[in-house]
Amino acid sequence: MKEGWEYKKLGVVTKQIRGVSYKPTDLSSNLIDKYVTLLRANNIQDTITFDDVQYVDRRKVNDKQYLKSGDILICASSGSKNLVGKAAQCKAALDACFGAFCKVVRPININNQYVGHFFQSNIYKKQIFEKARGANINNIKNEDLDNILIPVPPLPIQKQIVSHLDKLNEILDKLRDTLNVLDKAEQAIFYDMFGDPVENEKGWEIKKVKDIATVVGGSTPKTNVEEYWNGDLNWITPAELVGSMYLNDSVRKITNKAVQKTNLTLLPVGTVILSSRAPIGKIAISNIPTYCNQGFKNIICSSYISNIYVYAYLKCRVDYLISLGRGATFKEISKTIVENIPIPLPPLSLQQTFAARITTIEAQKQKLTTSIAKFQEMLDGAMDNYFSD
């Protein structure tokens, strides 16, 4: 324990506020007179968001249930134990309340921003996960939160810690904002050069994917056969597509024997990787030769179409791809469906000009991504240092 610090239970330095109980008849999908915004678990992201909100009759809300500056909104009950305990801090008082599956932790006699940072730390997440894991149902009881231990330094040190963590978060926010600007620039360049991909107002010739590429799926070697795994051949799953344009490595490796027994097809460098289920529409370009599991329908482009153009076109049509999903248990797009996706075919020279511009932007994005990872590591390390023994 750091000198002058002490551990306290959250129940000593915070108080809990229960969420609003209501009937379906008390809700509205639109903000009407005498109703107020109702936040739910889906509104708890890295920050509090206002996407997909409901509105509830104010008569169901007591004064304590309105969000105040410094309040920490927590998912207290969910069908997924991974979501239970997820938290975000309210930066200013809001004319909004929160539903019964959530609760608020309101700091008292402690710097509220310090507590807000604690709720984003691995130390908190580990404690809350252990409590959720042991529950018969996926919820956090009042005593679960009250008994969580938080290190409490003297108030001046709390303020210093908040200042340091705020600066790191501010840098990360600026880097992510810049990355978002570059993402939008890529889409703007696509629309400028090729027009709306749905309307095809420039009148490009329409081809089906099967006319300009080969569609290849994948499979999973038997997981209980040791000699199929930990080899030197790349093998990917949809979880490895994390938003970057290029796929540069695989988490798991397989052996030649796995390839032979499972009859897998090698995806060459430059293949457009497309997830076909769980979820549909994650897209990347492979920078490595790789095999894949059954969650993909990948596109190996012919010599007269740019893989970067195909990648960008599909990125603009993710909602369309999702709409093509078929199946009762889970939605999936089949090889035949992908083969018959229509795609406008601009002149190859124009596609190549586009690819060159996107490649330049992607190089900038890669530098930003590296910086984001560096500062995220610094932030995580700082919080581990502040909130652990």
Image: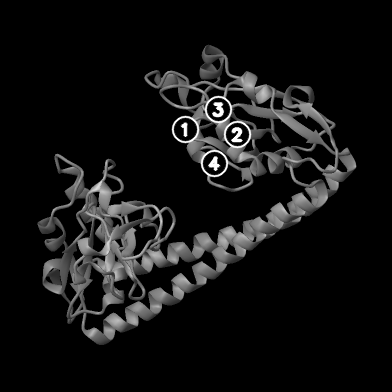
Which of pointers 3 and 1 lies earlier in the amino acid sequence? 1
Q: Which mark is residue 321?
A: 2
Quadrant in which the C terminus appears: bottom left
Q: Nearer the viewer, mark 1 or mark 4?
A: 1
Q: Position of residue 228 (x, y in %)?
A: 46, 21
Q: Nearer the viewer, residue 320 or 76?
A: 320
Callout 1–callout 4 Cβ contact below 8 Å: no
Which of pointers 2 and 1 lies earlier in the amino acid sequence? 1
Three-letter code for the amino acid on which mark 4 is drawn: Leu
Three-letter code for the amino acid on which mark 1 is drawn: Ala
Location of residue 226 by image quarter: top left
Q: Nearer the viewer, mark 2 or mark 1?
A: 2
Rendered view: 74 above or below 324: below
Say which residue label 1 marks. Answer: 278
C-alpha separation, residue under disc 2 versus residue under disc 3: 20 Å
Q: Residues within 10 Å of mark 3 (few under 14, many from 20)?
A: many
Rendered view: 110 above or below 196: below
- Kind of element beneath mark 2: helix
Residue at 49 percent of width and 35 percent of height: 279
Residue 251 visible at all: no
Q: Residues within 10 Å of mark 2 (few under 14, many from 20)?
A: many
Q: Position of residue 56 (x, y in %)?
A: 29, 58
Three-letter code for the amino acid on which mark 2 is drawn: Leu
Residue at 18 percent of width and 77 percent of height: 108
Say which residue label 3 marks. Answer: 292
Three-letter code for the amino acid on which mark 3 is drawn: Cys
Say which residue label 4 marks. Answer: 241
